[in-house]
Amino acid sequence: MSQRIIIAGGGTGGHIFPAIAVANAIKSVAPNASILFVGAQGKMEMEKVPQAGYHIKGLSIAGFNRSSLVKNIGLPFKLIKSFLQVRKILRQFKPNAVFGVGGYSSYPVLRMAQASGIDTYLHESNAFAGKSNILLGKKAKKIFVAAAGMETFFAAEKLMVTGNPVRSSIANITATAAQGKSEFGLDPNKPVLFVMGGSLGAKSINEAIASNLPALEAAGVQLLWQTGKPFLAEAKLAALGKSNIWVGDFITDMPLAYAAADVVISRSGAMSVAELCMVAKPTIFVPYPFAAEDHQTANAMALVNQQAAMLITNHDAKDKLVSTALQLITDVELCKQLSFNIKKMAKPNADVTIAKFILQHIK
């Protein structure tokens, strides 16, 4: 039986890397399965998916621009063009299942697949479902979710709680702390604060770090700083001449970065939370306050309420973030407690669970 699967979506690492994790799981269960990714032209999936060894087709689609209404004039034309592109892709690839991971490029692919009678599956990573997933969920065969309680958005009989897929390289880190620190040119004998603001960076976190570099240096703490592209030049300038800092816009080898980290500062997108639970690092979350339904705060509070993480608001980041991180990194007992509790909240094997379900139900 032919197993031909399209995986659609992207836009951010929070959509792309879980999609790649599921693709890898599909290939491990069914090595002969054919997988094609579909994303949005110009978005990071067009780079990251081929790096992972998969083919991807890009759609001429764009999201709604809230800051400049003028830029939305061409949206209807882009949407129509993307539907025509999807029709051609479906006709040529002939998938017998389509899996959507979110991001605006997933909508036309799953919508057209549903209209063509092809089985579709969704993954919703957050506690609040996105609008396109809610619409697509009406005709989806199964909806994989991170946690229970999603009946508000989807039909209960379609739900399957799997957790969020984490790349196996992160779920099964083999590198030591010394190897991780060495990879980034850092001293194996000094603590490392790993700062990551998601794949696109986080302005408030970056600004808080940049204005407190002398305090980190004075405390003997090293910095592994993933800035995202918008802040890279400013960060490099701030870090100039400081040997205790590694700066880059994006880290490809995240397992080594997690291995190097003693304490992590992060946004609380669903996928960052899932990864940090898996690697069990003491973490300070700074939720992005403008996420839909403030879901990042909800994600972080689920851990904070279990004494599994700390939280600093976006508003307080400039004044409190670095001082809190320095207190945590020297508090061995608190680090142990946070690490122990966050590990209990991990949901391993989500990628394999999703892959096996899709493969078992291919007609």
Image: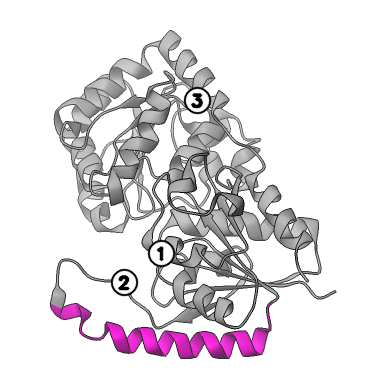
Residue 107: image quadrant is bottom left
Q: Can residue 141 be found in the magenta stretch?
A: no
Asked if residue 271 can be seen in this view, the reply is no
* Neighbourhood count class around disc 3 (C-alpha, 10 Å): few under 14, some 14–19, many 20 upward: many
Three-letter residue code for mark 2: Gly
Q: Position of residue 89 (x, y in %)?
A: 58, 86
Image coordinates of residue 263 in percent, x first then y, are 41, 26
Residue at the disc numbered 1: 11
Residue at 30% x, 85% y is 76
Q: Amino acid at mark 1?
A: Gly
- Residue closer to the observer: 314 or 257: 314
* CB within 8 Å, label 2 to label 1: yes
Residue drawn at x 44%, y 42% is 272
- Tell which of 279 and 33 is nearer to you: 33
State how far apart marks 2 and 1 are (Cα): 10 Å
Quadrant where the image shows the C terminus: bottom right
Q: Residues within 10 Å of mark 2 (few under 14, many from 20)?
A: some
Mark 3–mark 2 distance (CA, rounded to whole Å): 34 Å
Please, is residue 351 above or below residue 85 in the view?
Answer: above
Give me the disc on residue 342: 3
Residue 106: give x, y in percent of width and height.
47, 70
Secondary-structure class at tag 1? loop
Q: Which mark is residue 63?
A: 2
> Could you tell which of marks 1 and 3 lies nearer the N-terminus?
1
Give, as a single range, the part of the protein colored magenta.
70-95
Find out whether residue 75 is within the magenta segment.
Answer: yes
The reply to whether discs 3 and 2 touch (Cβ–Cβ < 8 Å) is: no
At x 14% / y 80%, what residue is drawn?
A: 70
